[in-house]
Image: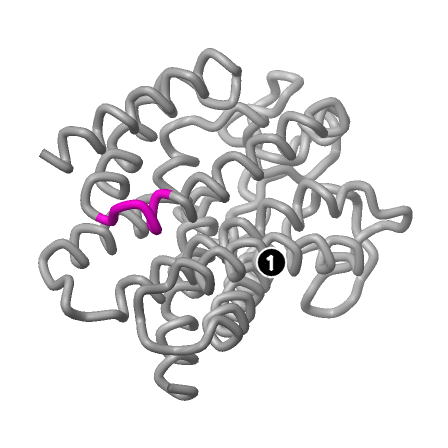
Amino acid sequence: MELVIGFILGGLIGLLAYRAGALSRSGGFAATLVGGLIFGLGGFPWAVLLMAFFISSSLLSRAFSRRKINLSDKISKGSRRDAGQVAANGSLAAILAVLYALAPEQDWQWIAFAGAMAAVNADTWGTELGMLSPGLPRLITNGQVVERGTSGGVSLMGYAAAFGGALLIGIGAGGLSAVEGSFVLVLLVVTLAGLLGSSFDSLLGATVQAIYFCPKCEKTTERHPSHTCGTRTTHHRGWRWLNNDMVNFACSFVGSVSAVILWQLFV
């Protein structure tokens, strides 16, 4: 019965988000599946963390969508999330909810879930608010100054925003945690895991994420097979299969694994 209610709630939220312009049609269906599993199998604490990520990240994406217009030739997708983006940010969380339902006596699934949510929230906040940085970003690998929207580019403001995104989930996880341990410890573990996941996202973006080149605009971009101008893009660097959605999934995975490792070290 809980699973049925979960899918009803997931479908309702997906529909409202679609109507509000936060999700595409495919994104709405994907959100129904992901949200249904998390709401139905994880319960209230899991639902709160998922909603904290979804609402805060969607509001930021919508609030600064106009600024993204100037970066549309660099980034692969806009502020309206499609199924790929929803799966990249939420599929691991849904899998963890299933594992929790199969073995609810264990506590690692909750910590792993919180770490995954902290990582994707930190990454989203860092990306959206980092665009407001007065200075140009620098590559996380060598400090080279790059254009705004360049994969792997980071800034002090971006990192501060990423910390805020991870901290929001950390506070929620600490307050709602059903595992033994102090509020402060859960908060610290989840927040740090979120920052590690977000940093790994930037590292992949600066090194092995697939980046393409538009010969007409003479710009590098995440867009493929065609640039915003309609010209076919050519492979510039990175692994062809590692697109932005895959990088976002890796971000959530590292956040999840980091949280479990840190929890085991400190508990």
> Is residue 57 toward the left or the right of residue 215 in the image?
left
Pick the residue in front: 188 or 253. Answer: 188
Q: Residue at x 35, y 58 (%)?
A: 113
**Residue 65: image location, x then y, percent:** 68, 25
Pick the residue in front: 171 or 95. Answer: 171
The rendered magenta stretch, by its main secondary structure, is classed as helix
Direction top: furthest residue: 19
**Residue 234: image location, x then y, percent:** 56, 36
Q: Quadrant of residue 177?
A: bottom left
Based on the picture, tell me whether residue 45 belongs to the magenta stretch: yes
Q: Residue at x 63, y 21 (%)?
A: 228
The quadrant in which the C terminus is found is bottom left
Identify the secondary structure beneath mark 1: helix
Direction right: furthest residue: 134
Q: Residue at x 79, y 53 (%)?
A: 137
Q: Residue at x 25, y 55 (%)?
A: 96
The quadrant in which the N terminus is found is top left
**Residue 171: image location, x then y, percent:** 53, 60
Pick the residue in front: 9 or 253. Answer: 9
In the image, residue 253 above or below residue 58: below
**Residue 60: image location, x then y, percent:** 65, 34
Tell me where the magenta segment starts and ends, as one range.
Answer: 42-47
> Is residue 79 toward the left or the right of residue 4 in the image?
right
Q: Amino acid at mark 1?
A: Ser
| Colour approach in the figure | one colour
Based on the picture, tell me whether residue 59 belongs to the magenta stretch: no
For label 1, the residue is: 202
> Is residue 128 toward the left or the right of residue 196 in the image?
right
